[in-house]
Image (cartoon, rainbow, N blue to C red):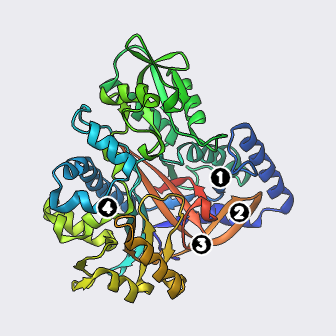
């Protein structure tokens, strides 16, 4: 789409298009070699899907997204307190899963504050009031994938792709956004400085399935070690308590990063979680409880009059412009996008073509149902399933994400296709980082056929 605030850089796109087959094959071979050397693989096959021509963003778009993200961050920091006092039914509406609820009930009143938080809201574009504007479609705060992938894709872009087409960011008039491994390193070191001053190292914790699975944490751990940190990576069940201290693989732990949901581990009184609970109760773990309130339905708080007192008038106006109408799907009355009071289930069935159904806690695009591309039977069955488990699904206005031409590497081939895109804005309360995903499909996710593209700002 012409005049889009997110676009593929034209010079590099054209040079890749006219590159001879031999030179293209040579470039792909070098990228595959880098991928093998740096564990930059997708499901053990080819290099991880990545953008080939730089994707650029207008500064005005990034400025708007940064302003919105600050509002979202402040709200999410309040979310645990909103649940504790059940502000306007918040606890019943924005439901925590059972395992997370157990940890919250047992420890939310004792874990020291402020709770550290790193968020990554995802934005797309939509036409609003005659202009393409950013539209928020979900929050992410736990298991923030893409840090290592963005870092390596950015490096490969600078070391292999741009030299192959005779370009540099400065010659193209572009400013690279920050390397996300460096961004994460500064954040977690700042968290430790504030909360974990004792002797010991940093534990990167995740709950892997039996037999393991893909994880970015070992590569992130290597980056942290290069930055001078003492780091161990492991499962929270591997933490051991000896002499009043917590150890991971023999290393005394001064601070920990939690890359898992409480749904994936035992409760706070379980012997297997003794070491983690000791760190958690002392406030030596990031992120804190605000991160557990990133389910899809929380966008209702930004689009419902019930929660408008939580925002200033200026914030409310900005949210109304950039957040699609969203509701947690339950049996109740609510206000429709047109401002009418409606029965929510009936409205969802009647307006199928205008809506999207999303499982509250899923990731990777799993379970998302776009009404205009679903059969009436599939839509009704999903609505019935959602109503049997109140809070498990959210319904959202469909956003027509315009496509723009892109070039990306996937499965060993360079593709030139019109793609939709989503922009993720990492924010820790003070600093920003960005990554971009592109996809020829309507669900923009690497798992759904897309690729991750390093983002550049136009000068």
Q: Picture coordinates of residue 249 (x, y %)?
A: 55, 20
Residue 298 disc label: 4
Which comes before the other along the chain, label 2 or label 4? 2
Which residue occupies the foreground of this view, 38 or 281?
281
The residue that disc 3 covers is 441
* Residue 430 visible, this angle: no
SS at circle 3: loop
Instruction: Quickly name the residue at label 1.
Output: 167
Which mark is drawn over residue 15? 2
Question: In which image quadrant can residue 133 be found?
Answer: bottom left
Q: Calculate the distance from the C-alpha at mark 1 to the C-alpha at mark 3.
A: 29 Å
Disc 2, disc 1: CB below 8 Å? yes
Question: Which label sits in the foreground, 2 or 4?
Answer: 4
Between disc 4 and disc 1, whose residue precedes?
1
Circle 4 or circle 3, nearest the eye: 4
Camera-nearest residue between 83 and 323: 83
Which circle, 1 or 3, is nearer the viewer?
3
Question: Alpha-carbon neighbours of circle 4 within 10 Å: few (<14), some, or many (≥20)?
Answer: many
């Amino acid at each position: 789409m012409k005049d889009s605030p997110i676009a593929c850089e034209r010079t590099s796109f054209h040079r890749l298009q006219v590159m001879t087959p031999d030179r293209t094959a040579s470039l792909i071979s070098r990228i595959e070699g880098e991928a093998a050397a740096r564990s930059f693989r997708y499901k053990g096959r080819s290099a991880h899907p990545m953008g080939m021509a730089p994707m650029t963003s207008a500064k005005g778009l990034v400025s708007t997204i940064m302003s919105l993200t600050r509002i979202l961050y402040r709200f999410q920091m309040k979310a645990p307190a909103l649940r504790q006092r059940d502000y306007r039914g918040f606890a019943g509406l924005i439901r925590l899963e059972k395992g997370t609820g157990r940890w919250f009930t047992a420890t939310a009143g004792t874990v020291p504050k402020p709770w550290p938080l790193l968020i990554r809201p995802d934005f797309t574009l939509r036409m609003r009031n005659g202009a393409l504007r950013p539209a928020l479609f979900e929050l992410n705060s736990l298991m923030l994938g893409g840090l290592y992938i963005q870092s390596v894709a950015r490096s490969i872009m600078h070391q292999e792709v741009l030299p192959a087409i005779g370009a540099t960011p400065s010659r193209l008039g572009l400013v690279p956004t920050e390397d996300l491994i460096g961004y994460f390193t500064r954040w977690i070191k700042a968290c430790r400085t504030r909360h974990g001053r004792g002797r010991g190292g940093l534990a990167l914790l995740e709950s892997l399935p039996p037999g393991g699975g893909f994880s970015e944490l070992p590569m992130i751990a290597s980056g942290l070690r290069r930055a001078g940190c003492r780091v161990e990576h492991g499962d929270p069940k591997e933490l051991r308590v000896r002499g009043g201290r917590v150890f991971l693989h023999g290393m005394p732990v001064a601070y920990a990063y939690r890359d898992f949901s409480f749904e994936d581990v035992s409760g706070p009184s379980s012997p297997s979680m003794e070491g983690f609970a000791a760190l958690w109760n002392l406030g030596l773990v990031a992120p804190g409880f605000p991160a557990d309130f990133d389910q899809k339905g929380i966008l209702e708080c930004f689009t419902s009059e019930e929660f408008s007192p939580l925002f200033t008038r200026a914030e409310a106006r900005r949210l109304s412009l950039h957040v699609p109408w969203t509701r947690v799907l339950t049996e109740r009355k609510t206000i429709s996008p047109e401002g009418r009071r409606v029965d929510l289930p009936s409205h969802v069935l009647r307006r199928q073509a205008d809506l999207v159904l999303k499982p509250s806690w899923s990731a990777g695009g799993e379970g998302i149902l776009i009404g205009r591309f679903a059969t009436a039977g599939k839509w009704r069955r999903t609505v019935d399933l959602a109503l049997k488990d109140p809070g498990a699904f959210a319904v959202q206005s469909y956003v027509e994400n315009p496509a723009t031409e892109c070039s990306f590497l996937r499965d060993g081939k360079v593709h030139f296709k019109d793609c939709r895109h989503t922009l993720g804005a990492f924010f820790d309360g003070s600093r920003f980082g960005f990554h971009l995903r592109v996809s020829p499909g309507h669900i923009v996710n690497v798992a759904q056929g897309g690729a991750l593209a390093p983002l550049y700002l136009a000068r």
